[in-house]
Amino acid sequence: VLGSDYGSTKYTSLASALEACAAASGCKGVSKIADGNYKLKGTTTTTSSKGKKSYIQGSAVTEYDDFYWTEKSGYQFDNKLAKTAYATKAKAMAACSAKSASCSGVSKI
């Protein structure tokens, strides 16, 4: 879940929250909160919270194996968990998902 709230308004749909966030200059994303509504967020800092979802502005997202992967162009991890090279992104994400406690993402090299 994204950190600090951006305003106090709750939105009943993801579409309305995303539209409001796009129009607000300080909004960085949207989080689905415990009551099922959505709130705008003023930071991209995230924390883990079971059953909640966050949407960070300007990021492409891929869902795989119940994980959400934010795609960032031009970045590569500076350490490697394994020396294995996978033929496809899906295979790399599956291997990372299996090691979710220690794997935080995959890089295309």
Image (cartoon, rainbow, N blue to C red):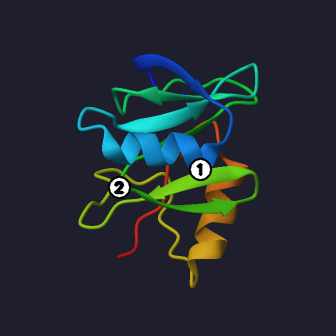
> Looking at the rendered structure, which numbered label has been put on residue 58?
2
Residue shown at the point (40%, 18%) measured from the top left: 7
Residue 68 badge: none
What is the x, y in percent for residue 43? 34, 28
Residue 79, image x, y percentages: 34, 50
Query: For this view, does 32 lie left or right of residue 108?
Result: right
Three-letter code for the amino acid on which mark 1 is drawn: Ala
Disc 1 target residue: 15
For label 1, the SS is helix
Q: Is residue 103 left or right of residue 27?
A: right
Please state, as top left, top right, bottom left or bottom right, where the N terminus lies in the image: top right
Whether residue 4 is situated above or below residue 15 in the rendered picture: above
| Quadrant in the picture for residue 16 | top right
- Determine the residue located farthest toward the bottom in the rendered image: 87
Question: What's the CA distance linking mark 1 and mark 2?
Answer: 15 Å
Q: In which quarter of the image is residue 108?
A: bottom left
